[in-house]
Image: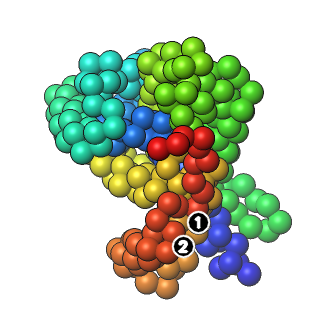
């Protein structure tokens, strides 16, 4: 029983990290067809925002809470600048966006090395997140529980925004049928920009969460960008609920395989499972229902 609970919790914890990294991608990739390889560097920017805020404010607890909205804004602004300067000319040209954003990610990594150095830096967790929490005789690390709750809160906030706000309705209309949305008077350009701001801002929040897992460095984003894309593809392009299911399924699968093998073998086997799944269901768990005649 101890092994079952521990591995399921480890899987959910790993899945919550994948979800935070992939939520923004699910939004931008689904709406605009942009393969944004710089999304990982937006995560890195969020992590360094937490590092800077802790140096400025000193108190670990206060700096963590303040870092979350500031990292969201930093990631969002970086995303809007990228969209406005480069990506808006490349919609529906995924290979071009892949190459361009990969170049941007290299530039951002070098900029981080110039500013913060090549060595990893630590952002100490606040005292109220140290140690375990005892639930029904089982111990769960508080930092992992915080990240899990943060991922669930980010998903619920995004889902509520998409369902109940005017911006959410514009985003859904643009995803389902862009020409019809434009005919209906929706400014798809403004909607794209706001979508990129939200999606990139969520990457910044993910970066703050990752500071609780260990040291951060300029290469932090490259460790998560491929896994984040896998979550988006398995969940279904542009499907937020699909990303949630895929993130937690992949997290639990990785945890269980890793328990009886090693982390490297588990990574390979999970990737093989994803390839096999996509052979059977290439559209992912869910697919977008559209009224397009194309």
| Towards the viewer: 292 or 268 | 292
Tags 1 and 2 touching, CB below 8 Å: yes
| Residue 211 seen | no
Distance from the alpha carbon under mark 1 to that under mark 2: 6 Å
Q: In this rendering, would 131 be left or right of 226?
A: right
Q: Position of residue 77 (x, y in %)?
A: 40, 19
SS at badge 1: helix
Toward the right, the furthest residue is 136
Residue position marked by numbered label 2 in the rendering? 253
- Identified at 72% across, 32% down, the residue is 163
Q: Position of residue 60 (x, y in %)?
A: 53, 30
| Towards the viewer: 61 or 261 | 261
- Identified at 20% across, 36% down, the residue is 100
- Identified at 49% across, 28% down, the residue is 179
Toward the bottom, the furthest residue is 260
The dot on residue 249 is 1
């Amino acid at each position: 029983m101890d092994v079952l609970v521990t591995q399921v919790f480890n899987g959910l914890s790993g899945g919550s990290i994948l979800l935070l990294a992939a939520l923004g991608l699910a939004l931008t990739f689904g709406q605009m067809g942009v393969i944004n390889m710089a999304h990982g560097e937006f995560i890195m920017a969020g992590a360094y925002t937490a590092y800077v805020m802790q140096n400025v404010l000193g108190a670990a607890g206060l700096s963590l809470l303040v870092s979350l909205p500031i990292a969201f804004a930093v990631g969002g602004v970086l995303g809007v600048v990228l969209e406005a300067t480069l990506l808006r000319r490349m919609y529906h040209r995924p290979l071009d966006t892949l190459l361009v954003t990969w170049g941007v990610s290299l530039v951002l990594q070098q900029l981080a090395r110039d500013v913060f150095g090549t060595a990893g830096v630590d952002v100490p967790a606040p005292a109220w997140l140290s140690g375990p929490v005892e639930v029904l005789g089982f111990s769960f690390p508080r930092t992992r529980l915080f990240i899990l709750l943060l991922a669930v809160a980010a998903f619920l906030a995004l889902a509520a925004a998409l369902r109940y706000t005017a911006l959410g309705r514009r985003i859904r209309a643009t995803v389902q049928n862009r020409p019809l949305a434009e005919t209906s008077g929706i400014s798809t350009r403004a909607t794209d920009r706001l979508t990129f701001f939200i999606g990139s801002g969520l990457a910044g929040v993910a970066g703050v969460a990752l500071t609780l897992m260990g040291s951060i460095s300029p290469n932090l984003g490259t460790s998560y960008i491929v896994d984040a894309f896998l979550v988006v593809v398995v969940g279904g392009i542009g499907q937020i609920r699909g990303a949630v299911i895929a993130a937690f399924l992949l997290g639990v699968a990785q945890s269980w395989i890793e328990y009886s093998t090693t982390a490297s073998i588990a990574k390979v086997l999970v990737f093989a499972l994803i390839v096999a799944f996509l052979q059977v269901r290439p559209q992912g768990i869910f697919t977008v229902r559209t009224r397009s005649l194309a």
